[in-house]
Amino acid sequence: MRLTSRKYSVVAPCVGLSDFHERPCVAQWRPAIMPQPRMMLVVTGDDFGYCPRRNQGIVDCFQAGGISNVSLLVNGSAVKQAADLAKRHNIPIGLHANLSEGIPVCPSLQQSSTLVNQHGFFHGKMGFRQALKRGELSMKQVELELRAQVGLFVELNGHLPEHMDGHQHVHVLPEVREVFAKVVSDLRIPYTRVPVEPGLYSCPWIPAHLHKFYKQVEKDALDAIPVFRRHGIRWPDVYLGLTTMGQNMSIPSLHRALSYALAANPPSSTSSSVQGSHQPVVTAELMVHPGYPSHPKEGGCGEGPDDFSQSADRQHELSVLKDPSVLALYCQERVQLCAFRDL
């Protein structure tokens, strides 16, 4: 399913927030407007709230024009600081729903539930998938946790998420996607992420074990599309980010990813269009992970920071995204950075 907006506007509707079903009045993020963009690109910094150094790197990246949106881990150790930073800098923000790392938000699920191990932590990226495959996870408990995470997001930010996706792509997994779609639809959260990336299978630099995992993520995402469509959930035409993670991010790899996205050429009946023009515009989301390396024992979602968080990969992404050459590439390819609310 593609976005159904027909016009590009940087001003989102503002109404009072009396419950989860109403949209907030949020300070508007206003990028420099490109007269005739070929692509509207949401560049999302994932894992906001993971640790103070991740938060600072994401804010630095936003201020440099390298990202246009963030996705918040509400069970992250530095989530309160992250929410405060988003308010201070008017950063568009959504929810990075987490069912695989750290401690649940819902109190009743923290000690004894199918979602946690004997130590009270989520089962992990692969452990969650294995438990799901064995039929050991309660979907009722998944729903309770997802609703609790949305509730905490609203408590921290004062408004609903502008979009909601899944940490480690758990939101597209079998059974989970049905529950996820119901929650997103019930609470009228307008957008999600569908991780199907063009050009993924022509990347020899991606290790075989990651290729295998990405292939399964793509299969799950494709199977999630009819579920999301049935619930009226929207997402951009194209997803990018698996081929440009960590050390694989470079100006050439970003250029390659954008080229694949622009070649997607979504049908004009369902894509966005530039105001005053009938030219269709590709809508896309680029998933990124900028930040400064976590200090040992500082950060995470209850278990401390993982290896990726402590590696140089995060700062490498930050450096590439802040490079003026990337902004020049966007201008050259007529790519307009935006937030989900602008689609």
Image (spheres, grey):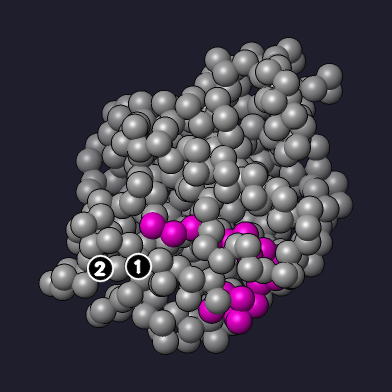
Q: Is residue 215 above or below residue 40?
A: above
- Residue in the image at 80% along x and 37% along y: 303
- Identify the residue at horizontal 48%, vertical 84% (top origin): 329
The residue drawn where x is 63% and y is 68% is: 202
Q: Is residue 128 above or below residue 264?
A: above
- Residue 58 lies in quadrant: bottom right
Q: Amino acid at mark 1?
A: Asn
Alpha carbon separation for disc pair 2 and 1 = 8 Å
Task: Give the secondary structure at mark 1.
Answer: loop
Residue under pointer 1: 265
Relative to residue 100, is residue 255 drawn left or right? left
> In this rendering, would 50 be left or right of 336?
right
In the image shown, does 41 or 111 lie closer to the viewer? Answer: 41
In percent of width and height, residue 298 lies at 80, 48
Magenta region includes residue 52? no
User: Residue 9: x percent and y percent?
Assistant: 23, 62
Question: Which quarter shows the C terminus?
Answer: bottom left
Q: Is residue 103 above or below residue 217?
A: above
Q: Which residues are magenta?
A: 237-255
The residue lying toward the viewer, choosing from 330 and 311, is 330
Residue at far left of view: 276
Q: Is residue 245 magenta?
A: yes
Which of pointers 2 and 1 indicates the residue nearer the eye? 1
Q: Which mark is residue 280?
A: 2
Residue 29, horizontal then vertical, whole percent: 36, 62
Residue 318 percent coordinates (x, y): 64, 70
Please say if the residues under marks 2 and 1 sit with CB atoms less than 8 Å apart: yes
Residue 89 visible here: no
Q: Residue at x 69, y 25 (%)?
A: 133
> Label 2 neighbourhood size at 10 Å, few (<14), some (14-19), many (20+)?
many
How crowded pointer 1 is (Cα within 10 Å; few <14, some 14-19, many 20+) is rated as some
